Image (spheres, rainbow, N blue to C red):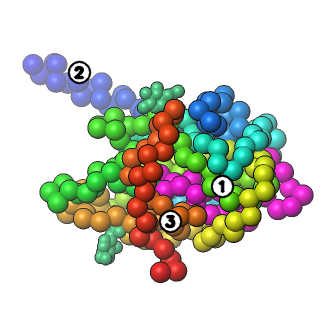
Amino acid sequence: MVTTRLSVLALVAVIPSTLAHYNFEALIVNDEVTGPYEYVRRTTNANSPITDVTSDDIVCNQGGLDADIMAATDTMTVSPGDTVGFDINSELGHPGPLAVYMSKAPEGTTAAAYKGGGDWFKVYDMTTSYISATDGLHWANYVGSTPITNFTFQLPEQLPPGDYLMRGEHIALHGAEQVGGAQHYMGCAQLTVTGSGSGSPAPLVKIPGVYTGEEPGLLINIYYPPPQNYTSPGPVSWPNKCEDHTPNLLGQASDGDCTESQTDPNA
Ligand SMILES: *[C@@H]1O[C@H](CO)[C@@H](O)[C@H](O)[C@H]1NC(C)=O
Ligand SMILES: *[C@@H]1O[C@H](CO)[C@@H](O)[C@H](O)[C@H]1NC(C)=O
């Protein structure tokens, strides 16, 4: 018995802690999964999270602003209203909110040459599936107890044409009870948006800058006492302040499951 228990402990000890980590690896467009890092900037960070919200690494992950990685990433042409998303390597294996931000490259700058120094807005937000009085927050990045491995959403019809970075971000909150404990996982896809959308995305934020690390959605003990509400960090999503509560998986149309986000900074 003792031997068995020791072996089990030894085995657990050698499982790398990076096992539960993950990457935004591939762009999804209209149900087609593109190649790993074909349209998403590669990272030099293996699959580790970024925890310093003031670091430039939080823009497009570590390496995502390196000239060679930017130049090696292709740019996908999409239309407003297209269904887009990310495929994850390997799975969104920790509890926390999922978001997608976009930033338009300045006139004359391609997506491949853009470092995301301009304005960003949120286009997708997904938080809890439900909140229980007894055990608190249940996260929508799990279906049952299984973490999702891909997700999609619809690009706003009003999205103005141009070159963009589209940045997926999942924030793992299992150790977020101290400042810097939240783990940010992200990846940037390079897009050219066609069409004649004439909306004005808002609210606008800078990345880094969008987070302090001390807002209620980032500095939180998600386990005890069981929280009875959750506010995702960053701005509300454009254009509908929509907060999703069930993931749209690859091949599934959006179920329109959206409540108005509580985080409107202008409210
Ligand atoms: C997308 O996610 C679903 C649910 O996790 C999974 O069944 C499916 O295999 C995934 N598809 C791909 C291409 O990863
Ligand atoms: C929950 O609601 C309380 C009261 O409005 C607020 O102070 C707290 O920041 C909220 N917590 C989260 C995680 O949003």
The single residue placed furthest to the right in the displayed view is 108
Q: Residue 157 bears which disc, if any?
A: 1
Identify the secondary structure beneath mark 1. loop
Q: Check mark 2 vs ligand 1: CB closer than 8 Å? yes or no.
A: no
Q: Read off the residue under disc 2.
A: 7
**Splitting the image into 4 quarters, where does residue 217 fall?**
bottom left
Specify the amino acid type for callout 1: Glu
Identify the secondary structure beneath mark 2. helix
Q: Residue 58 at x, y = what percent?
A: 60, 56
- Report crowding for label 2: few under 14, some 14 to 19, many 20 or more residues within 10 A (C-alpha): few
Which stretch appears magenta?
Answer: 98-125
Q: Residue 153 at x, y = what percent?
A: 54, 46
Q: Residue 241 bears which disc, if any?
A: 3
Q: Is residue 105 magenta?
A: yes
Q: Are marks 1 and 2 in contact (CB under 8 Å)?
A: no
- Report crowding for label 1: few under 14, some 14 to 19, many 20 or more residues within 10 A (C-alpha): some
Q: CA distance from mark 1 to mark 2?
A: 57 Å
Q: Quadrant of ligand 2?
A: bottom left
Specify the amino acid type for callout 2: Ser
Specify the amino acid type for callout 3: Lys
